[in-house]
Image (cartoon, rainbow, N blue to C red):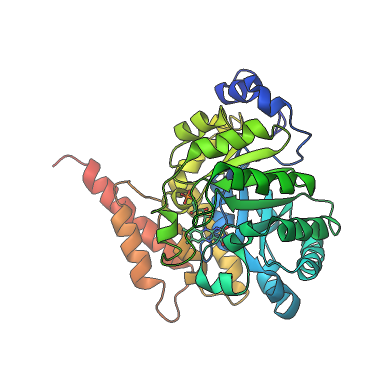
Amino acid sequence: MPPHAANPNHPFDTVLMSNPLSTQLPHQPLDRRLSVAPMMDWTTRDYRFLARLITRHTLLYTEMVVAQAILHGDRDRFLDFNDEEHPVALQLGGSDPQQLAQATRIAGDYGYDEINLNVGCPSDRVQQGKIGAILMAEPELVARCVEAMQAEVTVPVTVKTRIGIDDQDDYDFLYRFVDRMEASGCTSLTIHARKAILSGLSPKENRDIPPLIYQRAYAIKHAFPHIEIILNGGVKTLNEVHEHMGEVDGVMIGREAYQNPYFLAEADRVVFGDDHAIPSRQTIAEQFLPYVERRYALGHAPKHSLRHILNLFQGQPGARRFRRHLSENMHKPGTTPQVLMDALSRSEEHTSELQSPA
Ligand SMILES: Cc1cc2nc3c(=O)[nH]c(=O)nc-3n(C[C@H](O)[C@H](O)[C@H](O)COP(=O)(O)O)c2cc1C
């Protein structure tokens, strides 16, 4: 079966196909039933390579890259990615339609499968640059940005947003925003189902304190059946993904995909209906090694890629030893990628100690 074909025997596909709202969607070239959220400093190209060893079909988002950085900075540093990462979406930050258009054109040449605009980040720093959630108050401007970006690429231009900002947090406010996005031609929208509080809360607090209101995203899907609605916020298991899929078109997972990445190993079968054999954690670590070596040969210290594998054994016997060995050694000057194999053998020793009779 081709990777993105619907499998009528699979419960998840049954849910999707029986959801009359999903069948009204125009053709979507990308399968967004499950995605890993854009996360600064976390969803780097190294993390994405690792995540792709765990799941073949989950859509992966980059960290946010500010449009100006692409125009004036080291483009390859911000935009280069590994071929293996597909399907991969770039998230841009900005609010100047011309700058965003230029950045989109440049990024388009790198071969991203989607360009996403950040209208959800609440940090002070980005608010000063008029980037992120603050833009929810200016749907007209966001629409102009989206239109300008769309003119530059053939891949979809999408938007990630919140359900509201500060006291602009009722259904009508979100409805008007989405309505304007639909008119701009945006066909896929990710909604982090909590509002952003723009002053007084840190970005971290803004991911936990404002309550999650999933019903708001569900209601938007009902009101806009022709827009693909992806729900984000607080989802930690594939069971929860399954439940939301009865109401929306897809789910985006952030923190859990980083802090416990191996749970994504079931996603290909459970969400995408691809029954390939699931590699063990050990196998994934071994497959990551040649990548770390490749980056090392290009002059990248192993710690940059290895920090993303620290959580691979989350919840398993030997996980602490693995983590400890890596975090104590990967920062030392002169460390080579071999430190990963050393950490693996530490965790195995522990596992066999646990398994051998006393
Ligand atoms: C470390 C970190 C960095 C983040 N950076 C971004 C970002 O660059 N762009 C963005 O739209 N959201 C960013 N987010 C928010 C996530 O994309 C997501 O919306 C949020 O974590 C809620 O999803 P979750 O509950 O599944 O983690 C970040 C979150 C974290 C934890």
Whether residue 7 is visible: no
Percent position of residue 72, x then y:
73, 80
Residue drawn at the location 67% of the way across and 59% of the way down: 138
Total number of numbered discs in the rendering: 0
> From what the image shows, is residue 22 above or below residue 127?
above
Quadrant for the N terminus in the image: top right
- Name the image quarter holding the C terminus: top left
Question: Which of the 4 image quarters holds residue 44?
Answer: bottom right
Looking at the image, is 183 positioned above or below residue 12? below
Horizontal arrangement in the rendering, residue 6 relative to residue 104 (left or right): left
Q: Nearer the viewer, residue 138 or 133?
A: 138
Q: Can I make out residue 20 in this image?
A: yes
Residue 185 at what x, y percent from top left? Answer: 80, 46
Compared with 230, 114 (above or below) is below
Report the front residue among 296 and 174: 174
Image location of residue 320, percent across then percent down: 29, 56
Position of 108 with respect to 273 (left or right) is: right
Please state the horizontal and vertical placement of residue 144, each as a whole percent of the image: 78, 59
Q: Nearer the viewer, residue 268 or 38?
A: 38
Q: Residue at x 72, y 42 (%)?
A: 30
Q: Quadrant of residue 182?
A: top right
Residue at image position (82%, 60%) is 148
Residue found at the far left of this picture: 358
